[in-house]
Amino acid sequence: MTDPTHDAPGSSGIEGIAAITYATDRWDEARRFLADWGLTPVAEQPDQQQWETQNGAQVQVRRIDDPSLPPAIEPGPTLREVVWGVHDDATLDVLAKTLSSRRGYWADCYENNRIDAATCIGALDPQGLRVAFRRTSKRALALQGSPANPWGAVQRIDTPSPVYERAQPIEIGHVVFFTDRLAEMEAFYAALGFVTSDRYPGRGVFMRCAPQGGHHDLFLLQLPTGQVGLNHVAFTVRDIHEVFGGGLHMSRCGWKTQLGPGRHPISSAYFWYFENPCGGLIEYNADEDHLTAAWQAREFQPGPTVFAEWAIDGGIDGHTRRQPKVEASGAFLTEKRG
């Protein structure tokens, strides 16, 4: 079974993130981190590491001083490229026409209106990030998260929910950037077919790459400080239980939680954020809202309870199963000592 949230074509022809490229000077730490995160190693050379998710979305890590990469949008480790997968050659034709007038436009093997499966086209977005598009190479998967048992709609019968010892991300779910030119960035992505899901007026915009799909594939946030750069990359896992299992494993491995686990009220998704040696933050994410063309974008005012309905500051220690520096009380955490 494939996940209709992420695999159903929308009228834009863009299906989601096919690949990302990080650049970092924390080479060995990055390798250990991504292995603990649950990505599958594909290849490593002196100047690059290649990883992938379960459905074949690719994560490439390059040296921070690699001359083949475009200039970074911020100092230090960060994302240098986002590649979006498309369903057909017709979509690439449309995107090529839209991007041809943009700064940094390039096209491989794009001539005589014939595009082969290896073709990749791209340009720089208004912030200077390299954005590319190519035919999708993701694999369909027979995966399913654990059914829930909400009141009145019992779906899991005679079967316990799973307990995950660690996570194995299914795909790259979304990317989030700080920008100092929000309106220009939103217009750029809207021209490519992205649809606004919700917004913080004048401050941020959630966008999905097709009318039908998950709540957002891209979030652009403008801070009062004018900061520019990567906020985080989210990786989708099967369900809330894998968010917990993955987060606990990362904690046991010694990686630092930024925030989580928790729940976003805007997208309904469960999250757990960690600091990433490849740049910015990285998120386990599950159970986001599924939207269609009938959805009407909402407006919110920024605030902590809008960002997170609830969240655990500092995470959960992978050994005690409690917040860090909180002593476990015994075999049952609810036991009272008297």
Image (cartoon, helix red, strand yellow):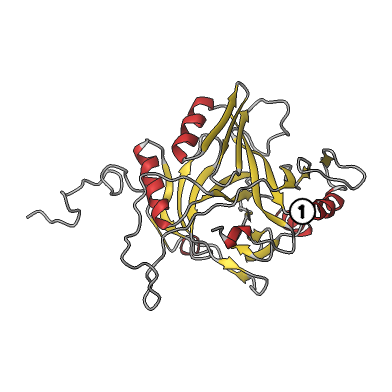
- Tell me if residue 52 comes above or below residue 28 in the rendering: below
For the question of whether residue 200 can be seen, the reply is no
The residue at the point 38 percent across, 78 percent down is: 152
Q: In the orientation shown, which residue stands out farthest toward the bottom?
A: 152
Q: Position of residue 110 (x, y in %)?
A: 86, 42
Left/right placement of residue 308 relative to residue 312 reads right
Which quadrant of the structure image shows residue 200?
bottom right
**SS for dot 1:** loop
Left/right placement of residue 325 relative to residue 197 reads left
For the question of whether residue 329 can be seen, the reply is yes
> Which quadrant of the rendered structure holds the N terminus?
bottom right
Residues 279 and 33: in front is 33
Residues 177 and 53: in front is 53
The residue at the point 67 percent across, 64 percent down is: 196
Q: Position of residue 3 (x, y in %)?
A: 56, 59
Residues 338 and 208: in front is 208
Which quadrant of the structure image shows residue 293?
bottom right
Q: Position of residue 127 (x, y in %)?
A: 72, 45
Which residue position is annotated with label 1? 88
Q: Position of residue 276 (x, y in %)?
A: 50, 38
The three-letter amino acid code for the residue at tag 1 is: Asp
The residue at the point 61 percent across, 71 percent down is: 298
